[in-house]
Image (spheres, helix red, strand yellow):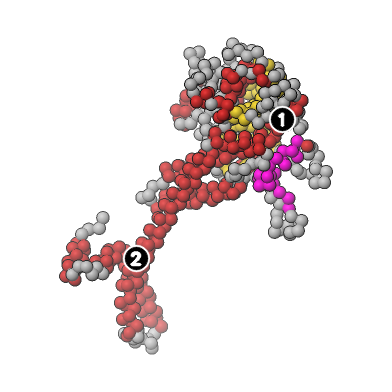
Amino acid sequence: MKSEHTVNHFRQIILWPLQLMPLADNAGQHHWELLEQNRSDSPWRRVENKFTGNKRSGGPGFQERYYKEFVTFPPYVQRFLYGESRSLNMPHTEDPPGDSALKIFRRHDVAALRLTLHTDAAPILLAVPFVGLYFFDDIDVVFLKVEVTASHLPLTTVRDIMYRFGRAYPTGWDDVGQGVHNAAKVEWLATDGHCIASSDFDNRDKFLSFTRWHRAPCSSSHWAFLLRPLALDPSEEVGEIRYRQIEHHRMPLMAYVAVDDPRSISREEWIRLGLIATLHPEEPIPIHDSDVTEFNIRYCYDRFWTNTDTGSNTRYLCSGRALIVVGDARESYFLNSDRGILAHFRHQYFILFLIAHLHRAALLIFSDRLVDAIHDMDIKQASSVNKFRQRIHSSFDAFLRFTHRYWFHEISERPHMQSLFRLCSNWLGNDALYDEVKEELRDMSQYLDSDAQRRQSTTVVRLTVVTTISLVGTVATGFLGMNIIDEANAPILLRWSYFFLTILGTVAFVLFSIMKSRRLSELMDILSDNRTPLRTRFALIAASSRQPRP
């Protein structure tokens, strides 16, 4: 469908969650620490905290939009995002300052994006104001954030960009060998305008060969370039920090769309914008689908949509994997990058979207680890069971830290922030996923507890058998007063010989009793059964002694 609307200001944020693999030779070191140390081989530089510097003046560069971002969230979210100060009434050793759990790295060598949506289409040039990596303490996940912006584009082109740009790899190829659903060509440009990396979606042999040998999808070359020195885990690429893809090729996205008179946008165009993550731009709208018939109820948040000339006309579309803000380009507040909706989009709404996808990514990683632990366990091998026990305890500890540090339902007291967060989390299915992972951990913990109890009861039975048998000798030697052999005046060497011979005999007797403790326990059970006659019991003992043990 052709649209007459022009997007005066367009901004898109791609947020790609990736699973970090354990470091091989850096025990106790975090991934972000290793990235910070290898500055000479990496274009990434850590972003300083907004709150560093002079506290009274707010620090250099501490702007009003940072303050508005900070006060949007409650204290427990503030501590997670920004850290906390040291108490003035407590010694420094007893109350150390809490650092932010969020570590941000940024690269500055990518200045623009040249995007060719179709092979017969002209390239589109977009600015790239931000490329960053977001690490989190206690969670092996990193988010790649790429922000692009452009002005005066047709709405149909904007929809096509949103649909095709954030693709990690092609899902197939057409008759001429071009990847489907993705852009025909993606090029990263340096500050001087030359291309520093480009996509290879049309290299079908590369993707087929990689998947065949590694049983994992391969990322396009322009995304691999952007992440270096991070390397895809199954690949042969050299890199200490390695990652795996958590979900499918479609990256979560945020979009800011400023048009003249958004009230004139048709219902079909609203549906295509809201369902941009699942509906192909050229696909006919499935009019009988419940997502279409109940579109306004399911995907639209219209608290600031008045549909009048004088009121605010900002509409939020959320499907979990996409959060889109559409507003009137004629309103100065909507375009204000310091106090308006544009500032909120880049700060408050981005953090909202980031936290929702952090919850999902972390829970998927926990689930994947549990599945891998079960897959690697062999109940016939004690070493495998012990390794499984260690992995489950480690996962349980990490899940506990995640629950108390990152997991929350109330993200802000502001109604629209809380409603958008709830809408995004519901579509991502975070609550159901959390309950599922928690139940899986509970099941595995109960299995380990029952296994430990079984081992403990077996040990108690064996010790009881050994004690019972040893009781005969203990009573006998105690009654006789240990005077069977009177060698008090014998030479010291002879007495030591008697001592060591007694020790060896006792150890041999105890070991033999332990080895036969299961059989002896069964015999004791037969003897203690008062429901059968004594003669029958001895017959059962004789029959049992002749049966070979399995």
Predominant SS of the magenta segment: helix
Q: Position of residue 120 (x, y in %)?
A: 59, 11
Residue 357, located in which quarter of the rendered image?
A: top right
Give the residue furthest to the bottom.
489
Of the residues tagged 1 and 2, which is closer to the observer? Answer: 1
What is the x, y in percent for residue 254? 63, 29
Q: Quadrant of the N terminus?
A: top right
In this rendering, would 363 be left or right of 259?
left
Q: Nearer the viewer, residue 61 or 513?
A: 61
Q: Residue at x 60, y 12 (%)?
A: 2
- Distance between the alpha carbons at the discs numbered 1 and 2: 72 Å
- Highlighted magenta segment, given as a residue range: 65-86
Name of the residue lying farthest toward the top: 120
Task: Determine whether, in the image, residue 199 is placed left or right of residue 503.
Answer: right
Q: Does residue 19 sit above or below 527 in this rendering?
A: above
Residue 186 versus residue 89: which sits nearer the camera? 89
Return the x and y of residue 322 as percentages of the image width and height.
Answer: 59, 29
Instruction: Name the residue at 45% across, 52% down.
Output: 445
Is the C terminus in the top left, top right, bottom left or bottom right quadrant?
bottom left
The kind of residue on which mark 1 rests is Ile
At x 66%, y 27%, the residue is: 305
Q: Position of residue 538 (x, y in %)?
A: 19, 68
Which label's residue is closer to the chain start, 1 or 2?
A: 1
Q: Amino acid at mark 2?
A: Arg
Residue, disc 2: 462
Residue 157 lies, with reference to residue 525, above or below; the image says above
Q: Pointers 1 and 2 in contact (CB under 8 A)?
A: no
Queried whether the magenta region covers residue 74, the answer comes back as yes
Q: Nearer the viewer, residue 123 or 4?
A: 4
Give the label on residue 341, or none.
1
The answer to whether residue 195 is above or below residue 77 is: above
